[in-house]
Image (spheres, rainbow, N blue to C red):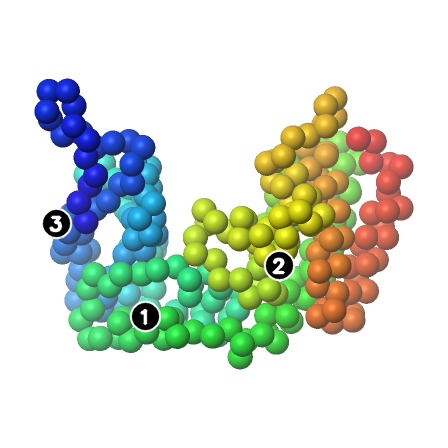
Amino acid sequence: MASPTSHNQDGSDQQTVDSVVMLSDEFLQTLVAEIDNDDIVGITLGGSYLRGNATPYSDVDLGCFYKDDVSLLLHRLMYRNGLLVSINTRTVAQIRAALTRPEQAIFLVAAPRHVLLDKDGSVEELMQEIATFRLEPLRQKARAYASFQMMLAAELVHKILSEILRRNDLAIAAATAKLLSSLTEIVAVQGGLFIKSDSVYYQHVEEAVGSESAWTRYHRLVAGIDMLPANVSPVKVRAVASLHLYQETIGLLRATMQSEHVAVAEQAMQVFRDAGPRLRL
């Protein structure tokens, strides 16, 4: 995969910064040779370089598959030829197990992978399983997961309200970010959305719910995408918007949530409504 080039006035080649960046086969082969050892069964390339939308700041995303009976190395990073190389270690068995969990599967099956090394055929076999994956057998698991997580998120509702009363802006910001992340994942899992990459994650979820929906409007406000009202505290506006986002998420999921989880979520929203006069935005 050769790097795109442009020509200077003197005729010399220069890589264009605003073009898609690619990797040479020689570079990839050198990486594989450096990383490979007797405990490894295969190596894959994923991420933006494989999707064809890498920038000069993209990392080289390698999946390093080890034998089941060896201790895995930690995720590690290194620089080669000025590029950040990210090496994720896993086993084929671990990925197969992840495919039985909807909250993990939705981030695995749509992300393309190219096999750079496969010593025993197990990695290619796994790629075929991923390619033919269907979420339908896990649909009930997905709904149960989303319902349970909605109940747990009630704690974040109370955390945000508490920190607003304390006027602790940093704590408000931290809890708001957690609630945004949690609600986004909940909607993605419950809806069975296959996420290709982090770059399109939030966009994909918003499009699935509806670009003009109240859920998406609150989601964009909490994420800091849309403009905030003037003369108010941004952190508090986003915090309160996240609580409205929780309410909208209840509306989206109510029909598939377990009754005891709905009861907790609705009570948390009643606490929010009752707290209105104390919020002092």
Q: Which residue is mark 3?
A: 26
Q: Which residue is mark 2?
A: 187
Q: Secondary structure at mark 2?
A: helix
Residues at circles 3 and 1 in contact by the CB criterion of under 8 Å? no
How far apart are the two marked residues, 2 and 3, measured between alpha carbons?
42 Å
Judge left or right: residue 86 versus residue 272. left
Along the line of sight, the residue nearer the viewer: 153 or 24: 24
Q: Residue at x 79, y 62 (%)?
A: 264
Quarter of the image where one finds residue 141: bottom right
* In the image, residue 127 above or below residue 168: below
**Amino acid identity at mark 3:** Glu
Crowdedness of circle 1 by 10 Å Cα count: few (<14), some, many (20+)?
some
Q: Which residue is mark 1?
A: 127
Residues at circles 1 and 2 in contact by the CB criterion of under 8 Å? no
Judge left or right: residue 204 versus residue 183. left
Judge left or right: residue 102 versus residue 256. left
Q: Earlier in the sequence, mark 1 or mark 2?
A: 1
Residue 8, position as x, y percentages in the image: 16, 23
Residue 76 shows in the view: no
Q: Residue at x 81, y 65 (%)?
A: 263
